[in-house]
């Protein structure tokens, strides 16, 4: 299978390099092609998502993505900023379903700001819609009747968009603890009211899954108060952006958590949920585990290789149990040393 | 001065009754008038915000508000749901600035899900815009060209709206630790880009305040990782709704935290940030402290009575130090007993 490697900005190249080492060590029938993306691509080719990069991503069986974003481009016109690369890939490849597991790795209780008994109970998946919402609605600047500058963004969902992400939520819950919590702001937003109505109607097809609804402000509280109550959360693009980052931090270091963005078939883009972290880029301090675990998700979802996925996951858990830790986990291991420890436990 | 008491739904009446006892015990020159609001008003008068209630709120010097919301009205048309009462009051009274202090009360370290050293460092104010954003934009249902039902809500801010809330943020920071963090999602939203531009230009008037900008997903993480880093956060209506609830939970029980919603003058609406909690309504289990502390905020901001405000705040702290605790704080005191303990320490 062909894997597109898109390292991107900041610590992206460092963590992608380590994930590649892990994949190569498995001796699977994989070939790799690399292409620039984000700020790096803008500098090199004049666009954060150059046509060749997009073509490679389309051609590949799966995409392993590092990170994009760099404050040096804050003043650049929106269409050319690094973030547009990931938004463009999600849109162009139809990657509508973002799976973000959040789970505390045994031994990392200290890394969470939550009390160990609260953090230790976290084991959830956030299913975030990734192709709609206020992210992709009409947006711009205009002048009001009073002559004032105004910025606007249209939030919307239609029933088909909600239906397909709701199904991913129910299917995900079905093979876990069978509890699905749909998060919205239906007391204020019409978009959320439609969301809630559609989720309820899809629920009739999944009588074995227990469905609840929660307002997003309450969900943000409950994720702190008692995150162990959640099994699967399904929510829209904007609320999912906020809640999944919050949940991952509750589960300890953001350096540990992978994600998958899937289309309706087997194609997927896999990326660590941490960003480009320009402040530590190039220093060998980045934790490669989130990217290595993203590679495991890639094997599971796009390449149907559950065995290799679990091999990687066990190796990461083993390295942590042995006490190997990058600085984000309170240790002193370098990016490469952390990956070495994983590689040593792959056998 | 005339105080409008709007108890509302669920535990609202119980906590308002106790706050009234505390205010009366101060022997100030206050008169009280009560009116129904929310689901209670809908049942009694056919509307969640009856004209008489709105008129009283307009006439009064300040409004002390309990809570609205009741799942029994979930199927009622949006315009008649309990939540419309609070949205209507904010809009009709021009209450654009929501101040939500979050601070851990000494002795309540155990009530937070965060490690004591993390929670103990929390001392911030969230300044949330309350009259604009996707809350009040055009919204509705329509049918797409493919014949699909769609829900939509327009998010927007104009420069004047951002300017006035930014000023509240800077003024609030100026009398605290002089650090203001503006939270937006400028990497995706045009509304946020305008927000950021305007906040930056207002900043030139406040050279003594250190301004930073943070994306909302990162803010949700940082509020868990290290909430002690924040002094004042200023943000829009939707992000403020989510982050302020999250922050208050980080600071322990949501039963402890007050809020103020202010207009451009001295008029304000004061309410506990917890909701109507229908599950414990009428059982004497509700913590009245958030409402009592809201009454203190009312004395401070609307009635210019800092001395009485601090008297109340010291009495609440004293009652907690003495170990009096409602169930949300792990104790067994009833709503009235908790208020008794505060009253006993008012002298
Ligand atoms: C970089 C940014 C556009 C992106 C988003 O908001 O979706 C990121 O925060 C994420 O969650 O993947
Ligand atoms: C009840 C609801 C409309 C309200 C809001 O979203 O503003 C509440 O959550 C709040 O924060 O005061």
Image: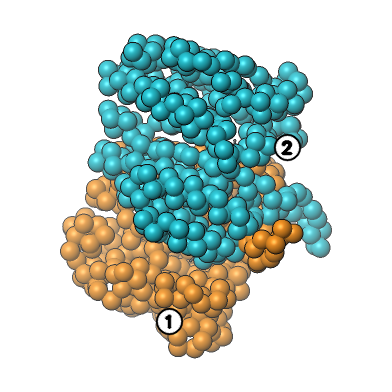
Chain colours: A cyan, B orange
**For residue A337, above or below residue B200:** above
Q: Can you identify the residue that label 2 sits on? A: A78
**At numbered mark 2, what does the secondary structure look like: helix, strand or loop?**
helix
The part of the image, by quadrant, that contains residue B131 is bottom right
**For residue A86, above or below residue B248:** above
Measured from the top left, where is residue A175 in percent x and y? 37, 44
Task: Report the residue at 71% width, 26% height from top.
Answer: A55
Q: Can you identify the residue that label 1 sits on? A: B40
Measured from the top left, where is residue B214 in percent x and y? 56, 39
Q: Who is closer to the viewer here, A107 or A295? A: A295
**At numbered mark 1, what does the secondary structure look like: helix, strand or loop?**
helix
Chain letter belonging to callout 1 = B
Task: Report the residue at 47% width, 29% height from top.
Answer: A304
Q: Who is closer to the viewer here, B130 or A268? A: A268
Question: Gap between marks 2 and 1, in whole Å?
Answer: 48 Å
Q: Residues within 10 Å of mark 1 (few under 14, many from 20)?
A: many
Measured from the top left, where is residue A227 in percent x and y? 34, 47
**For residue B172, above or below residue B264:** above
On screen, residue B261 versus residue A339, left or right, reads right
**For residue A199, above or below residue B63:** above
Task: Report the residue at 33% width, 61% height from top.
Answer: B255
């Amino acid at each position: 299978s062909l894997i597109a490697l898109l390292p991107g900005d900041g610590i992206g190249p460092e963590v992608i390099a380590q994930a590649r080492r892990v994949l190569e060590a498995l001796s699977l029938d994989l070939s790799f092609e690399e292409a620039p993306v984000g700020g790096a691509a803008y500098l090199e080719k004049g666009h954060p998502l150059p046509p060749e990069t997009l073509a490679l991503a389309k051609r590949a069986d799966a995409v392993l993505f590092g990170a994009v974003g760099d404050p040096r481009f804050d003043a650049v016109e929106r269409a050319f900023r690094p973030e547009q690369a990931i938004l463009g890939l999600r849109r162009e490849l139809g990657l509508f379903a973002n799976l973000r597991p959040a789970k505390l790795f045994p031994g990392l209780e200290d890394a969470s700001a939550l009390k160990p008994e609260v953090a230790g109970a976290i084991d959830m998946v956030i299913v975030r819609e990734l192709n709609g919402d206020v992210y992709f609605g009409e947006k711009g600047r205009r002048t009001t009747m009073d002559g004032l500058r105004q910025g606007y963004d249209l939030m919307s969902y239609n029933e088909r968009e909600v239906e397909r992400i709701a199904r991913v939520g129910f299917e995900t819950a079905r093979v876990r603890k069978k509890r699905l919590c749909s998060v919205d702001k239906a007391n204020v937003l019409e978009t959320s009211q439609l969301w809630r109505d559609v989720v309820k109607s899809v629920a009739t097809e999944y009588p074995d899954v227990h469905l609840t609804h929660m307002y997003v402000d309450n969900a943000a509280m409950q994720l702190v108060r008692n995150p162990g109550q959640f099994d699967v959360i399904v929510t829209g693009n904007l609320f999912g952006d906020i809640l999944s980052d919050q949940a991952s931090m509750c589960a300890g270091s953001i350096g540990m958590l992978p994600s998958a963005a899937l289309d309706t078939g087997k194609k997927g883009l896999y990326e660590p949920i941490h960003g480009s972290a320009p402040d530590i880029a190039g220093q060998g301090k980045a934790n490669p585990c989130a990217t290595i675990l993203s590679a495991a998700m890639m094997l599971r979802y796009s390449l149907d290789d559950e065995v290799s996925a679990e091999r990687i996951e066990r190796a990461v858990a083993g390295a942590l149990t042995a006490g190997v830790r990058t600085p984000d986990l309170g240790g002193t291991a370098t990016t490469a040393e952390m990956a070495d420890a994983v590689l040593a436990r792959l056998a």
